[in-house]
Amino acid sequence: MKISLVVAEQQGQRWIEREVEAGCTAQQAIEQSGLLKELPWYDPEAHKLGIFGRVVKPDTPLQEGDRIEIYRPITCDPETVERRDLD
C-alpha cells in the first residue's frame, strides 16, 4: 500500500512516498522505507509519531494513503520565546 512519510528538519521539510506491506504499523513503515539510514538522530523511544497531525503510537496499524509524521522535540519553551512580528 502507498503511504507518505514527512520529517521536519532544520533545513526544511522532507516528504517521501513509499510502498509498504499491507497491515504494517507506523514504525514498521519507517523501517521499511529506508528512511532510518538518512535520519541518524531518529530514536523511536524519544520521538513522537503522527498520522495527519494526530499523535499515534508506533504500533498503530496503517491504512492506504496515510501520512506518517516524525516529530522533532521542541527545543525551546514557547512561553519564554519572544514573538516574531510576521507583518
Image (cartoon, rainbow, N blue to C red):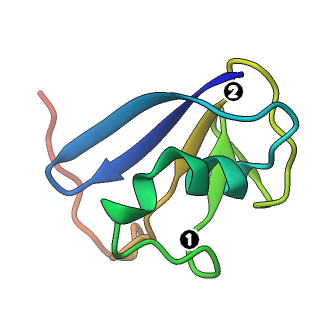
Mark number for residue 13?
none
Residue 1, position as x, y percentages in the image: 72, 22
Q: Nearer the viewer, mark 2 or mark 1?
A: 2
Q: Tag 2's secondary structure?
A: loop
5 vs 52, nearest the viewer: 5
In the figure, residue 9 lies in which quadrant?
A: bottom left
Residue 75, position as x, y percentages in the image: 34, 76
Question: Are there few (<14), some (14-19), or many (20+) residues within 10 Å of tag 2?
Answer: some
Q: Is residue 77 left or right of residue 56?
A: left
Give the spatial CA distance, label 2 vs label 1. Answer: 19 Å
77 vs 66, nearest the viewer: 66
Give the mark nearer the N terminus: 2 vs 1: 1
Q: Which residue is mark 2?
A: 66
Residue 59, position as x, y percentages in the image: 84, 59
Q: Which residue is mark 1?
A: 47
Residue 3, position as x, y percentages in the image: 62, 27
